[in-house]
Every structure is written in structure tokens, then in C-alpha cells.
Image (cartoon, rainbow, N blue to C red):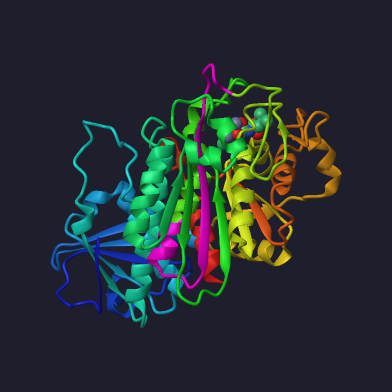
Amino acid sequence: MKISIDRLPQNHKGLILLPFEESESLRYPTDFQKLKISSVLFSGKKDTQFLLEDSASERTYLLIGLGKNPDYKTIQTAFRRLTAKQSRLFEKGALLAIQEEMKDSFLEAAVSGLYLGTYRLGHFKKTEEPKLDWENVSLRISSSFEDAEKIAERASKIANAQLQVFNLVDLPSNTVTPEYLSDWARNAGKTFGFEVKVLGRAEAKEQHLDAFLAVSQGSHREPQFIIAQYNPENPKKHIGLVGKGVTFDTGGLNIKTAGMVHMKCDMGGAAAVLGAMQAIADLKLPVKVTAIVPCVENSVDNQAFLPSDVIGSYAGKTIEIIDTDAEGRLILADGLSYLIKNHQPDSVIDLATLTGSTVGTFGYECAALFTNDIDLSQNLQKSGESIGERVWPLPLWDVYQPEIESEIADLKNYHGKPFAGAIVAAKFLEAFTENHGSWAHIDIAGTAFGDSEFAKTKHATGFGMHLLLNLLEKI
Ligand code: BES
Ligand code: ZN
Ligand code: ZN
């Protein structure tokens, strides 16, 4: 979209978008006083619209209802709906009229929503109807905000990174392989300004990333251990990120009997972290960030690791494999200890589609948060609340420690019991954090991929990218 900021020109023709919060008597912006219509027809209720055609002035007014005190996600979704479902309205461009009393975040949510709505799931369709040339659609914003231009640009950068996350998660595992992810990271690094180093199988062997390698054994796809670094001048802090990059999770020899078809989403943590790196560099945040993204396919052949195998790890701890489907914690274990030993970040955050247990606990609207840092916990909750990516804490109490103790090795990767799955997985990860005092693990199994009004099948939500960005902006 080509965005420009304008006062409303008298002779403006075409589509005018007018968002309204619900109210007994709607407040129309000064330029649109004569538009007032009966509250019976439109009162700004959530998820309502009213379309008014004025042939004399060649204008089409689209009144958009947002409900009372709409939050960020509600505003974003209302605008996403427009470009997703009514794209033809935008053929000749549009003007968005922002009212004076609306906040900066309103404009950001609206513009990013318009961008997100341009996403289409039909990546491989040969027969899809022609897409609008969104890059050339002009969007005029009439707003009295001083920094409207900056906010709109910021929104477009955030949306751009989110669209990348959508792509990475929705594309299938025969496209998004570990090598696809490392290529993506190298390209984004060049475009947006961060360093990328990748360890393949041989280098990972040299480094003794044995838990990471064990998961990759049953697949012909080369594992990729991505190390990305964004290093601005005079950074305020150094944050470490880790994202689970299982490009497909068959379960391994403990093969999945349910839900395997959705397991292309098992690199949702990787996508969120890589997307965050793009946005962080694009927005030039004054924070140093080191991201580790271990990427593997968890598949089955005669080389695959076996239940009962004892494997090593970068931290030097031995692990008894109880279940090959508990693979995410193995690659994260190496990711976490590699990050902490070699880069010593001030805080560490990992994102992973880790357990079905999280889906059972929080469903699809909230991710599970585990952390030993109360400030980080509160900041993550606040960030999540403000942009509609909720997280809520679960405990890391030591009473759960026996669940990961093994008789034959230092640890086991699964307790084999039908309870506390998310907590036990988090306790396992904790064992690889080198007692770091500021670590947060976010289990996004329920929130990374799901149903929405924007597609008939489950699809990427982009969860996590914006959460990380928002958190890092507050540092
Ligand atoms: N990738 C799955 C977790 C998952 C579940 C992601 C649902 C997205 C949606 C993970 O690797 C897994 O298989 N977890 C198992 C572990 C168990 C078998 C040891 C689980 O939680 O059921
Ligand atoms: Zn699994
Ligand atoms: Zn998995």
C-alpha cells in the first residue's frame, strides 16, 4: 500500500473509511457532520458496517463499528476484515479518517490490520482469482496526529514481519525445510541488518549439539542451527531468544496418531523469533538481540532415534528418551544452553509449540508462560494484553522435578503421565538454562495456529512476533 497523510481534500472521491466506537450518539468527525444517520441503522456496534454511496460527490462511505472501548485486536481485526473480504472496495484506493480522540495505537492497529488482510492462504493455487496489486493501492490517512506518518510506517513494518510469520508457518513442510528457514534468515539479515551464522550437521556435531542432532536423525533433511545477532550501537540491554523450529513433527517412532496434519506449525516459535528479528532490525530498536533457532524435521527412517536411547546434549547432561514425540524440548535444551554459555544475555525468552497440555489448559487465546523473573513475567503479560497476544503464568515449582529424573541418565525427556505436561516440559527446559536468573519459556502450542474468520482451515496466527517486539520496545 502507498500511504500518505493528508487533511481531507474537499474533492476527494472514492472510498472513505470511518471507524466508530459504539455510542448512544455517534461523534462524526467535523468533515463528515452532514453524514449523520439514524442510530437504528448504525450505532458503532462491534462487527457492524454501514455502506453509504453518494453518487453526487462520487464518494463511498464505509462506517465501521468497533463496539465500546475496542482493544488493539478488535480494531486490527475489523480493518483486516476489510482488505481480506472486501478487497474490491480498495481498487481505486481509500481514505481512512481517524478521529482526534483516537489514540496512536488505534492508527497502528488499523493500518496493520489493513495490511494483514491482504494475506491469502492459496499459496499453490493455479486458479485463484487475480489478486489486487496491493503495493500500488493508495491509502490516504486523514489525521491530526503529529506523527501519523511515523505510526503508519511502524504499523506497516510490524505487519510486514507478521505476514512473513504467516508465510513461514502456513507453507508446507516440503517447502519450509530447515534449509528454507536458514536461507530466509540469511536474506532477512542482509535486508534488515542483522548477522546470521548457521551450523549444519557437521558443525553441530563438532559443537556437540547432540540433543538437537538426535531429533534430526530420522530425516534426510539437513538440520540447521541458526544463530542470528542484531547488534546496535550502545544497546540498552542484551536479550536472548530461542524458537522451536521443528519444520514437521511426525512424532518420530512414537508416531502421532492424531493431529499430525497440523504439525507443519511446529516451527511457529522459530517463525515468531525470526519475524521478531526482522521487525527489531527494521525498527532499529536500541537493544542487542541474539536469537538461536534450532531447525529440524522430526521424522522416521532406520536412522531415527529410538525410545529408550540415551543421548547427550550441549550442556553435557545425558537424556533418556522416553518418547520421541517430546522432541521440541530436546532441540530447545541445546538452543538454550548454547545461547547462555556462549552469549550471556541479560534475559532469555524461548517460544515453542511445545505441548498439547497447554492447549488443554488455555485453549487458543492464551499461551502458557513459565518464568523465574517476576518483572519479565509482568512485562510479558502487559505487552500481551496490550496487543492481543495473551500469556498467563504456570509454576516451575521443584515439586515437579522428580518427573524428569531418570534412573539410567541425568534426565528423561517425558514423565509418561497424563497430567502436568506443559509444566514438566518447562522443568526439563529449566535444567538447561544454567541457572540463568531471567528466563521465560512461552508455550504457544495453542496460539500459533488455529481457526479464525479468515480461512476455512487452521492457519498461522503470527502469535509471538508482536509480543516479543512490544516487550523489547519497553526495555
Ligand atoms: N509439537 C507437539 C506439541 C503440539 C501440540 C504443538 C499441539 C501444536 C499443537 C510436541 O512436540 C508434542 O508432540 N508434544 C507431546 C509430547 C508428549 C507426547 C510427550 C504432547 O504434548 O502431547
Ligand atoms: Zn512432538
Ligand atoms: Zn513438536
**Residue appearing at x 52%, y 25% in the figure:** 299
Quadrant of the image containing the N terminus: bottom left
Magenta segment range?
A: 276-304
Task: Return the x and y of residue 156 as percentages of the image width and height.
Answer: 34, 63
Write the residue at 30% across / 37% down: 123
Looking at this view, is 253 or 136 the one in front? 253
The one nearer the camera, 448 or 61, is 448
* Image coordinates for residue 320, horizontal then vertical, percent: 73, 30
Q: Quadrant of the C terminus?
A: bottom right
Q: Is residue 288 magenta?
A: yes
Give left or right: position of 193 versus 295: left
Left or right, 118 with respect to 414, comes to: left
> Residue placed at 77% from the left, 34% from the top?
419
| Above-or-below relation of 413 to 228 | above
- Can residue 67 be seen in this snapshot? no
For residue 155, which quarter of the picture?
Answer: bottom left
Does 382 sit left or right of 56 as displayed? right
Q: Is residue 289 magenta?
A: yes
